[in-house]
Amino acid sequence: MSSIGDALRGIGQKWDGVVDGFNRKPTPVKLGFLLLFVLFFYALPLLRPPLLTTGGIDFGGVMFQVIAFALVALGLNIVIGYAGLLDLGYVGFYCVGAYTTGVLTVYHGSWPFLLALPVAVAVTMVTGVILGAPTLRVRGDYLAIVTLGFGEIIRIVVTNVEWLGAASGIKDIPHPPNIGPNPEGPFVDPSERGLFQIPRLEWDGLVPHLDHDHPTSFLIFGSQDAIPYYWLLLTVLILVLIGDRLVKASRVGRAWEATREDEDAAELMGVPTFKYKLMAFALGAAIGGLSGSFYASSQGGYINPQSFPLLLSMLFVAAVILGGSGNRWGAIAGGALVAYLPERFRDINDYRLLIFGLALTVLAVLRPEGLLPPRRTRRAKAMEAEIEALEEGELEEDANA
C-alpha cells in the first residue's frame, strides 16, 4: 500500500509541476491552449474516442451528465471551497431549479423555457437566502446538519404536495427552443432538420470512419440526440466559469478567503462575514438551480422526487473534495469524474459502484488535497517540505557534531 501511495504522490507532484509550468506561460500561449482544450471538448461526443466512449449507453447522454455534474460542482465549490461552508443538502437547490422549470412550463403554466430559466435561477437564489439567513450564524457540524435536513425537506415536500406533482412527478417538460427547421414525422429526412448536420466518427478498432447515417442536427433539441444539450450546457458552463473567475478575483472573493481561513479574525478586521457567507450561499444556490433547470428540460423532459436522492448531495460534495476544494478547475474535473466513472464501468454492472467507491477512497486517503488543489495548498505543501528538509538537516548536523 505504501508503494502505491508513494507512486500516487509522485504522480501528484509531477502534475503540480505541470500546472505551475502552465501558469508561468505567457498569456497568449495559455489562451491558445485553452482554446484548443475547449474545441476538443465541444467535439468530444462526435469524435467518440475508443478509450473514452461508454459501451451500452449513449455517449452523448453521458457527456451531458458529466457537464451537468461539473456545473453543479462549480457552484458548490463557491460554498465549500471559497467560503468554507459545508453544505450537505445542495441537491435541494438542484431540485428547486428543476421543479420551478417544470411548474412554470407545463404543470401550472405554459411559459417558454428561456423565460422560465431565469425565474428558476432567481427562485433558487431566494431559497438559498431564506435557508442561509437563519442558519449561517452556526458553524461547522451544525451547519452541515441543517443543510442536510434542508435537502431531505425539499424531497419530502415535492413527494407529498399534489400541486408539485407529488410522487408521480412532472412530465412533458419542454426542451430549449430549436434553431433551424425541425419537421416532425416518422419519414422525415434527417438532413431536413436544423441548419446543418454533423456526422459522427465510428471506430473500427483504431481506424476511424464517418457515420453519415446518424448525424447530429445542429442545435435541434429532442429526445433522440443528447449532443445539442451537451453543447448548450458546455457553453453555459464556460460562461459561469468566466463569472466565477471575475468574482473570485474581486473584493468579494478576498472576503470569502478571509472568512474561510479565520472568521473571527476577519470580523475583527472589519469584514462583514455573515453578509459574504450569505452571498456565497445564494450564488452557489443559483448555479445549482441553473443546472437543475437544464436537467428538467433535457432529453426525457420528466422529473420526480426520486430524481433527487440524498446520495446526489454526497456525490456533489465528493466531486468538490476529490477535484480540489477551492480550485474551480479541480471542481470541474471532480464533477466530471464522479459522473463519468460509474458509466464507464457499466459493462461490469455488478462491480462498477464498488470500483468507483474504492477509487474515491484511495484518492481521498493518498491525495487528500484533491486532484487539482488550489495554489495556496500547493504552496503550503512546498513550505512544509522545505521546513522538514531543514529540520532533518539540522538533526543530521547535531548527530555528526
Image (cartoon, rainbow, N blue to C red):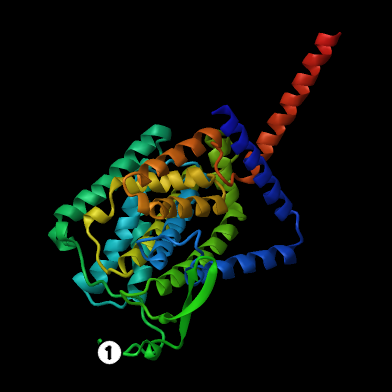
Q: Is residue 182 above or below residue 286?
A: below
The quadrant where residue 111 appears: bottom left
Q: Is residue 201 above or below residue 83?
A: below
Residue sitting at 30 percent across and 58 percent down? 96
Q: Quadrant of the C terminus?
A: top right
Q: Secondary structure at mark 1?
A: loop
Q: In the image, is 187 to the left or to the right of 74? A: left
Please provide percent x and percent y for residue 160.
14, 53
Identify the residue position indicated by label 1 in the image: 187
**Viewer-closest of 186 and 129:** 186
Q: Is residue 61 above or below residue 218?
A: above
Q: In the image, is 325 to the left or to the right of 151? A: right
Please provide percent x and percent y for residue 124.
35, 59
Looking at the image, how many numbered discs can be counted on the residues?
1
Q: Is residue 59 above or below residue 250?
A: below
Residue sitting at 15 percent across and 56 percent down? 167
The answer to whether residue 112 is seen in the rendering is yes
**Viewer-closest of 366 and 254:** 366
